[in-house]
Image (cartoon, rainbow, N blue to C red):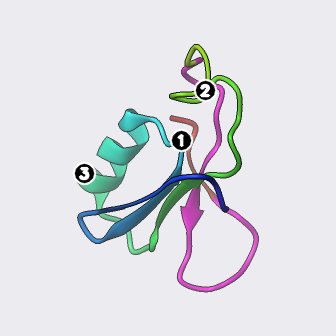
């Protein structure tokens, strides 16, 4: 889930080039997770060339290890 940027937002970790709609969803729903992430630096993510909405996987950062779970496709 590692990437190049990390932010703390309202008690959550936001890792990588996460689209704003996913952050708004996180803050509105307040799920019991540590945060959300877009791993790596994928082309088409916000800040990495023209953003292509609907093309990124945004994943949950869970409390315990396991398979990554999709949080939002944006």
- Labels 2 and 1: the sequence-earlier one: 1
Residue interval drawn in magenta: 52-69
Asked if the residue at tag 1 contacts the one at tag 2, i.e. Cβ–Cβ closer than 8 Å, the answer is: yes
Real-space Cα distance between discs 1 and 3?
19 Å
Image quarter of residue 30: bottom left
Q: Which residue is mark 1?
A: 17
Q: Residue furthest bottom?
A: 64
From the image, state whether disc 2 or disc 3 is nearer to you: 2
Residue bearing mark 3: 28
Whether residues under marks 1 and 3 lie with C-beta atoms below 8 angstroms apart, the answer is no
Q: Is residue 9 positioned above or below 11 on the image?
A: above
| Quadrant where the N terminus is found in the figure | bottom right
Q: Residue at x 55, y 19 (%)?
A: 51
How far apart marks 2 and 1 lie (CA) works out to: 8 Å
Vertical position of residue 23 compared to residue 7: above or below: above
In primary-sequence order, the first of circles 2 and 3 is 3
Q: CA distance from mark 2 to mark 3?
A: 26 Å
Left or right: 38 in relation to 35: right
Residue ID for mark 2: 48
Left or right: 56 in relation to 61: right
């Amino acid at each position: 889930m590692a990437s190049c940027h990390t932010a703390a937002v309202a008690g959550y970790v936001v890792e990588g080039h996460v689209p704003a709609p996913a952050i708004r969803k996180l803050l509105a729903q307040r799920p019991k997770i540590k945060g959300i992430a877009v791993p790596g630096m994928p082309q088409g993510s916000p800040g990495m060339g023209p953003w292509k909405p609907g093309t990124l996987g945004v994943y949950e950062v869970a409390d315990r290890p396991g398979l990554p779970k999709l949080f939002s496709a944006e």
